[in-house]
Amino acid sequence: MVNSDKDLSEEDDYVPYIPVKYRKIEKMKKLKNSILAAKIKCEAENLSSNEEESIENDNFLSRDMEIKEKTNTDINKEINNMLLQEEQDTLLDFYERKPVSLLDQHSELKKKAEEQKETAKEKQLKEEEKILQSIAGRKALLSVGELARGIQYTEPIKTSWTVPKCISNMGEGRHERVRKKYQILVDGVDIPPPIKRFEDMKFPDAILKALKSKGIKDPTPIQMQGMPAVLSGRDIIGIAFTGSGKTLVFTLPILIFALEQEIKLPFEPYEGPYGLIVCPSRELARQTYQILNYYAGYLKEDGYPEIRIGLFIGGMPFKEQLAVIHKGVHIVVATPGRLMMMLGEKMVNLEVCRYLCLDEADRMVDMGFEEDVRTIISFFRGQRQTLLFSATMPLKIQNFAKSALVLPILINVGRAGAAALNVKQDVEYVKPEARVVCLLDTLQKSPPPVLIFAERKQDVDAIHEYLLLKGVEAVAIHGGKDQEERTRAVDSFVSGEKDVLVATDVASKGLDFPNIQHVVNFDMPDDIENYVHRIGRTGRSGKAGMSTTYINKSSDDSVLMDLKHLLLEAKQDVPPILITLTADKDQLVEIDGDRGCAYCGGLGHRITDCPKLEAMQTKQASNIGRKDYLAHGGADY
Ligand code: ADP
Ligand code: MG
């Protein structure tokens, strides 16, 4: 004990606590004595001055005693009164407090805590409001020309298509019931009714035949509501689960419109395109192109004029692309980079283009194509019909799109960004260095075909090499491989020749591989939307699927939070490790039933902590002064 001396001395100085009540009594006693002394003195003086002559010694003494006694009883009375008062106060206090039970006290405290929380909530909401205002409207998707001329279209484009009488006559009540039954949420004015049969959408027989031969009988919910809207010429924002059939919502109407134009007045050389579909990746563009060609083939077979479709993507010789332009092209499917280049070089123009579709629009913004899309739009002349599609449609796109769409109809099937519910999602904790070896076990979980996603190209190559060494029939694609190799890999995987496709996120958006059994995430993507897109490659058109995701310490905290809430929403098991990793961050994720982030749609955080918004703002700041976008290399076109 080093400080024992000090301790002892401190103990010696120790003054015990004396309750106020006793301190008061002590004080009163002291006061009593001093008053007594003063009174005696005073009386004695009086006595000596007034009755000086008549006083005798013993007399004086007896008087002194008398005074002392008298004063004493007075003061005692006073003290007793005070003590009585004190006691009464204490008693009163006790009785007054008595009706406040523990339960009442608890609820009182709770109320106070609520109030505090309320203010925290209000503060949060206020802050969010501010952020939302600052990003709203800033990104108007208007063409430069339209902006310059101040053109604002207020009426949707007119088409010759009308809702069949038998359906419009059924009344709004029926339309509401159908929407409710299929969980179709709509927003907008003059919304056409949902139609439950392809036959009622007035498609030519050739299209119905083509659908049938693909095994497509009835429209999916997004098709029920989306197709009538698009066919009536309306601008739409379409949000639906991955694999819910969004592609047909924009491909079939554009084929019909192009056909109508061609029948009215055949396309001349170098004329067109009439319709433009922009996709964020080459593979997705190619797939959409193939779908268009499939249906156009059926039309041609049935005696309709030929609909020519162009595929403008990077990594392809210009010769083919120029050849189709030379003949006059009805529809172009493109990635932003190649299209911008061709527009810039005047190889193609958008003078007669009246139909623009941005597929996977949110990915487009995430991948930094926003500025590119704006440039592309600046090449339009005249009004167009604009369609935006995505599985996830956070606020960033809605703002981005609002001013460019004319009386848009927002169609939302299921929550934007929700994972497809028929995918069983496993999450496993695997250390970074153990992942490659773990893959073989994971692959045992399901029959082929299996898709493996990794963020980095090096990882894709490493996994590919490892699987080949172990005798697994695997192919790989990423942005660093040339287009021919990419196409060959995808084709061999789609045809079933290869069992496993290892890929970066070039394959995560919109690609529709048939019957994928299992999606493996070698790493957790940096943002939750990407995760939704990745696992959305399985469990398509109502089939069951599964996904396995490796997480570890290097996974981003915020995305793990989003993942946890996504799993909870999809009623999946949340692994204990995920609960522990995110245990302290659960507050204020939901306010008044409004969950997650308004900007990116992630469920595990609010807009105030949105990593994407932050990244976007940083990027914008670094983009200031960037003019030469036509020349920039871009990521993956
Ligand atoms: P999304 O773009 O919504 O992710 P896709 O348009 O790629 O989905 O469609 C996914 C799969 O569903 C495709 O294979 C497509 O042929 C199929 N499909 C589309 N519409 C229907 C339908 N009405 N009924 C059955 N299958 C459909
Ligand atoms: Mg799609």
Image: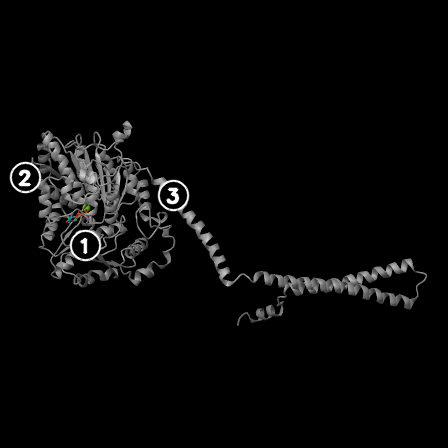
- In terms of image quadrants, where is residue 432? bottom left
Estimate the x, y position of residue 31 in percent, counting from the top left: 74, 62
610 vs 419, left or right, is right
Q: Disc 1 beta carbon < 8 A from ligand 1?
A: no
Secondary structure of the residue carrying tag 2 is loop
Vertical arrangement, residue 148 with respect to residue 204, above or below: above
Real-space CA distance between mark 3 and mark 2, rounded to the nearest whole angstrom: 55 Å
**What amino acid does circle 2 point to?**
Asp
Q: Nearer the viewer, residue 104 or 342?
A: 104
In the image, which disc is placed on residue 422? Answer: none
Label 2 neighbourhood size at 10 Å, few (<14), some (14-19), many (20+)? few
85 vs 402, left or right, is right
Q: Can I make out residue 395 in this image?
A: yes
**What amino acid does circle 3 point to?**
Glu
> Which mark lies nearer to you, 1 or 2?
2
In the image, which disc is placed on residue 129? Answer: 3
In the image, which disc is placed on residue 302? Answer: 2
**What amino acid does circle 1 point to?**
Gly
In the image, which disc is placed on residue 539? Answer: 1
